Amino acid sequence: MTEPDTDTGTGTGNEAEAEFSTFMHRWSAAIVANDIALMNEFVTDDWVLIDKPGIISREGFHAAVASGALTHSAMTHDVLSVRRLRPDVAVVITHGRNIASFQGARIEADEWTSDVLILTDAGWRCALTQLTPRAVPFDS
């Protein structure tokens, strides 16, 4: 695994990596549980996901999960970079992998994720997630 790039302002890089790795692991577990109430604990009310179809609102993502149209059976994130832009704002970049089903079709994703997290009174919450598919290595 690539060494994380951490710029936390306070504390050590390892502390920031551990804190945000735990956050990402717990959020992934909530998504794999397909539990909207648990997922809400990790995102802001105005969270958006940017993926291949475009901008997906929290309400749209959660509605797809609640209806059963979208389910996840596996999800992992390796934190590669943590940047504290301010004491209450962090950008976390990960290598994410997941297995899901959308309207009955299996999806396997291997992607880079960029998450903007905001520190609230309730703890860290994600305000924006950008997914970028990893390129398949070119065989020469």
Image (cartoon, rainbow, N blue to C red):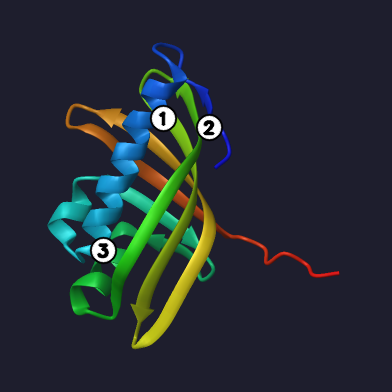
| Residue matched to label 1 | 17
Contact (Cβ within 8 Å) of mark 1 with mark 2: yes
Q: Secondary structure at mark 2?
A: loop
The label number, if any, that marks residue 32 in the structure image: 3
Label 1 neighbour load within 10 Å: few <14, some 14-19, many 20+:
many
CA–CA distance between discs 1 and 2? 7 Å
Q: Secondary structure at mark 3?
A: helix
User: Which quarter of the rendering shows the N terminus?
Assistant: top right
User: Which quarter of the rendering shows the C terminus?
Assistant: bottom right
Residue 52 locus on image (x, y percent):
54, 68
Label 3 neighbour load within 10 Å: few <14, some 14-19, many 20+:
some
For residue 8, side relative to residue 20 (left or right): right
Q: Is residue 44 visible?
A: no
From the viewer's perspective, is residue 68 above or below residue 78? below
Q: Is residue 135 or residue 35 the one in the foreground? A: 135
Tell me the residue at 35%/79% (across/down): 101
The mark nearer the N terminus, 2 or 3, is 2
The mark nearer the N terminus, 1 or 2, is 2
For discs 2 and 3, the disc positioned in front in the rendered view = 2
| Residue matched to label 2 | 4
Outermost residue on the left side: it is 37
Tell me the residue at 22%/54% (across/down): 39
Tell me the residue at 41%/63% (across/down): 56
- Three-letter residue code for mark 1: Glu
